[in-house]
Image (cartoon, coloured by chain):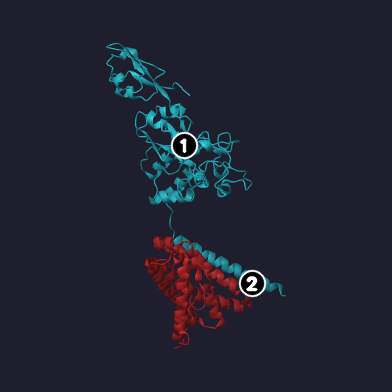
Amino acid sequence: MDFRQILIAAGMIGGMGLVFGAVLAIVGRIFRTEDDPRKEQVRALLPGANCGGCGYPGCDAYAEAILKGEATVDKCPVGGDSVMRAIAEVMGVTASAKDRKVATVRCRGSLDRCNLRFDYDGPKDCKSASLAGAGDKACEYSCLGFGDCESACPFDAIHVTDGRLAVVDDKKCVGCGVCLTACPRGVLQLMTYSHPVHSACSAHLSGKVVRDACKAGCIGCGKCQRACKFDALKLINNLPEIDFDKCKACMQCVDNCPTGAIMAFNEMRRHAMIHYPDCTGCGDCQKVCKFEAIRGEGDAHRSIIEWNCVGCGECAEVCPHNCIEMRPGGVFRK
Amino acid sequence: MNLILIFVGGVLVNNFVMNRFMGICPFLGVSKKTETAFGMGMAVTFVITLASVITYFVRQLLVSLDIAYMQTLAFILVIAVLVQVVELVLRKLSYALYQALGVYLPLITTNCAVLGATILNVDNGYNLVQSAVNGFGASIGFTLAIVLFSGIREKMELSDLPEWMKGFPGALIGAGLMAVAFSGFKGLI
């Protein structure tokens, strides 16, 4: 074996590499194309979580889609409003405010409420459990509570309690929707954070079946529908469907639910307060109040009967003198 | 006369895709639309023809230095550079085609049709002109196959195939039938 031969071979291939590299450099110079500089900017603004919540395979792909005009700037659930506005500025478009979405567990069936049908001994994940006779929890719509969502969540915003029920930390949740696809039961849903009430049960079964399985399930009694004075809630397939355009956040559906299958966003509870100096005693508020929560006669000042006021805000809307103020906090009945 | 034989042999008789089973990856990957298939064919034509010419000189150089055994490595180097050049040029001149070819464009680098053509030139002992004609013929053969095949696939998209035949199963059977048809050219030269 001649040592020189190796040197020649190495030198030859190396030399070729050098020559070709030089050729490439020259061609690259001649045919230079420039990337849109905005792409870098948009990409830098995105959080880089690559969660896919926007519907694109990662932040890079989303940035590209924005540049092509295929995607609107408001898709990133992680960055939220601030990122959306920053991108809109780069792209020279106007962005409109978007409702914040959070994942919500539509089930309250922890182990102390929901019965078990059998001892499940298989792999401890929801997908396996849901295949074994539709899960061991007595309700086939229930959260199985093995934490497929917990391990899928890129933001540590969802945890399973001891009672085998997933609970979303709505401060951390960005609404990317990864947990929704991880859940084999579909009990996770994206809900608008600012909605005053939401249904917390997914069981479409009839009242007796639900009752036998779970203490906290919706039994389809219809009390919520009757309690809703604004026609915003309908019982469809044994579950309440809420029309949020009509909902006034009076929380009557929640307060009248015998099983707690509708949950209230309690920070949105309000009550009315009348500022006496401005009140002329016109009585418009009294006429419109559906809860008999305003008293007073003739030209006298009207006053609020606080234990009747649910905070629907109808009176404040009709008051011609703007003397009714809706204040946060309400009277809790349950 | 010899050159015409080499050319026809490359295009029809010893078609790279249909007869030698080289370059199957882009053949199946980029044959969904006739337009991109043609673009791919042109890119491959450019690379193979130029590679045939350049590797001829490289081969001479290697032989003169008595290191002919390095030819595979050296050829791949040549091909890689050519593909890079094609990529740069395409990106500048036709961004749409660049996008449509996508990952298959850099994959020409490892496309055995290209390396196959250059090594066959060596094995057959072709001179410079013969090498160029053989490379050109082979790549025209590739283009012919991929364009015909993409036409078939476009038709198949519209036809009423059973669910399990849609997509690649049907395409592969179509490719097989095309290979049968091409074997009819056997004995032409």
Compute the Cα span from label 1 to label 2: 84 Å
Residue at the extreme right of the image, as rendered: A1
* Element at label 1: helix
Which residue was labeled with disc 2? A9
The residue sitting at 50% across, 62% down in the picture is A25
Q: Quadrant of residue B184?
A: bottom left
Which residue was labeled with disc 1? A207
**Display colour for chain B:** red
Residue B112 vertical position relative to residue A207 in the rendered view, above or below: below
The chain in cyan: A
Q: Quadrant of residue B155?
A: bottom left
Residue B102 vertical position relative to residue A42 in the rendered view, above or below: below
Left or right: residue A127 compared with residue B39: right
Q: The disc labelled 1 sits on which kind of residue?
A: Gly
The residue sitting at 49% across, 67% down in the picture is B83
Q: Earlier in the sequence, mark 1 or mark 2?
A: 2
The residue sitting at 61% across, 77% down in the picture is B68
* Element at label 2: helix
Residue at the extreme front of the image, as rendered: A208
> For the residue carrying disc 1, how many other residues have a C-alpha within 10 Å: few (<14), some (14-19), or many (20+)?
some
The residue sitting at 31% across, 20% down in the picture is A285
Q: Position of residue B66 (x, y in %)?
A: 63, 78
